[in-house]
Amino acid sequence: MFWILPRELRCEIKIKIIYKVKNCMWALLPLKDFVQAKQRLSGSLTVSERRGLFHAMVEDVLTVMSVHPSLERVVLVSDDPAAQLLAEHYRVECWSERSFAVRGLSAVVTAALAKIQAIAVGEQNTVMVVHGDLPLLCASELDTVICEHQQLLDAGNSGLSIVTDRHQRGSNILVCDPARPLNLAYGADSCALHCEEARRIGIPAQVLQLPGIGQDIDTREDLLRLLALPRTGVATHTLTFLHDTGIAQRLNTMNTEANVDALITHTESALSEWNTL
């Protein structure tokens, strides 16, 4: 079964004591080498700027997840020294990616899920796989994800919940049961592929759309959209980094110049057409 839940949907009951999650919930954050992160921003940011941006976004994610009462264990997966330092600072765990001896995001997450299942053998576990480029992640949206997934579990023994991006293509958060292994397919159109995989193995799937989690940061346009939002207490580390480094001012200037160039081009084209009449 497959549902798309509208953005406006929220759990009416504010998750009574966080909905009293019935099993152990883990959070898994697979992190690339920070130097290699955000390659699609290479035309706008330097290597050191991309590394700093990713570090700030991961801090925003950990600020929320490390203290969320429904998450019993939070695990980073990375070999970057910065990830280990963040794990120590936020008092979460960090597992070596090299220890899994696999390559690629899907394979790494699959191996980490298998390790969780082996550690907690005999227990009923739920794992929330979260990406590090979600600076607008907030506790209330996590509450919604947990509540909706628990309601899915109440209707059966297993299920898959996906919080997609604003384009409804990616899997920004994936909540699953490690005892029911999925053939993960992170990358283009992963949301549809993961839903198809859920149908293949016979478990229900639901897709959630939430404004904060849906705003992952991959492109200059994503950064401009983030910078245009009012400062409301979320994305604090990311916004501070962007402003303190001068990146925000530079991006806004580049955007203004691009808009002016586009206007000039449009005007010249219109005048050319008018002169041919």
Image: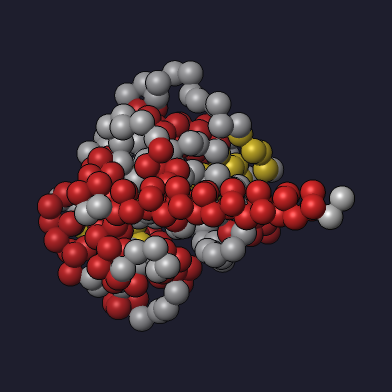
Q: Using residue 48 as the reference point, say whether residue 10 is left or right of it.
A: right
Residue drawn at (55%, 26%) of the image:
8
Residue furthest to the bottom in view is 101
Q: Is residue 33 above or below residue 208?
A: below
Q: Using residue 178 as the reference point, say whether residue 74 is left or right of it.
A: left
Horizontal and vertical percent position of residue 276: 84, 55
Horizontal and vertical percent position of residue 16: 37, 21
Q: Using residue 242 as the reference point, say whether residue 137 is left or right of it.
A: right
Residue furthest to the top in view is 13
Residue drawn at (34%, 72%) of the image:
36
Residue drawn at (52%, 49%) of the image:
259
Horizontal and vertical percent position of residue 56: 25, 52
Query: In front: 96, or 163?
Result: 163
Horizontal and vertical percent position of residue 190: 58, 59
Residue drawn at (45%, 48%) of the image:
256
Q: Quadrant of residue 18?
A: top left
Identify the colour scheme used.
Answer: secondary structure
Across the whole image, how many numbered discs are drawn on residues?
Answer: 0
Query: Can residue 178 be seen from the camera position used here?
Result: no
Query: In front: 246, or 7?
Result: 246
Q: Quadrant of residue 141?
A: top left
Residue furthest to the right in view is 277
Q: Quadrant of residue 67?
A: top left
Query: Can residue 143 be seen from the camera position used here?
Result: yes
Look at the image and tell me in which quarter the N terminus lies: top right
Q: Is residue 80 above or below residue 212?
A: below
